[in-house]
Amino acid sequence: MSQQQSTPPPKPTPIPQQDNEFYWEKAKAHELWLRKCSDCNEVYFYPRDISPCCFSRNTEWIKASGKGTLYTWGITVRPPTPAFREDAPFVLAIVDLEEGCRIPTNLVGIPKDPDPEKMAAHITHGMAVEVAFEDRTDAISVPVFKPVDS
């Protein structure tokens, strides 16, 4: 008796809200935009109308360079849901953006291997990375990062 492979369910997608709808529109266009507080001059992520630094509403959108460095990372070998089964193992990461904030993301462009140690050999703390986008649906693209060399 053969087991039939089922198609994995779709990956979860963010639901744009009023204060981040612009962010998701730009992500769909494969552009990374961030919020900057005009009062305390801090750039921050996740985009929202109120600065998490000083609680000011005097904020603006800025286009990010899309460049950064890898702050920390981990390899996920057991997917959190069936939707990510085909991606495993994959790299979860936090990236320090040139603009001064951190963004949680996935690190892509790393040779995939069932042995996490072999994957880890291609990853170093502080490595230069740049944004790429994963198109999840016709309306939502999620920023991911890849090594600058790939």
Image (tube, rainbow, N blue to C red):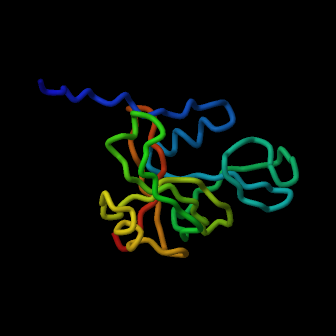
Q: Position of residue 25 (x, y in %)?
A: 52, 39
Which image quadrant: the N terminus? top left
Which image quadrant: the C terminus? bottom left
State whether residue 69 is above or below residue 78.
Answer: below
Q: Which residue is located at x 83 percent, y 44 percent?
A: 57
In this orientation, which residue lies closer to the viewer: 91 or 1? 1
Point out the residue furthest to the left here.
1
Q: Which residue is located at x 39 percent, y 68 percent?
A: 117
Q: Tally the marks.
A: 0
Task: Using residue 26 as the reference point, say whether residue 1 is left or right of it.
Answer: left
Q: Which residue is located at x 54 percent, y 74 percent?
A: 125
Quadrant in the rendering for residue 135: top left
State whether residue 8 is above or below residue 106.
Answer: above
Task: Using residue 7 as the reference point, say whether residue 147 is left or right of it.
Answer: right
Q: Position of residue 42 (x, y in %)?
A: 77, 61
Point out the residue furthest to the front here.
1
In this orientation, which residue lies closer to the viewer: 94 or 3? 3
Q: Position of residue 35 (x, y in %)?
A: 69, 51
State whether residue 39 is above or below residue 141.
Answer: below
Q: Position of residue 12 (x, y in %)?
A: 47, 33
Q: Which residue is located at x 43 percent, y 43 percent?
A: 79
Task: Using residue 73 as the reference point, say whether residue 61 is left or right of it.
Answer: right
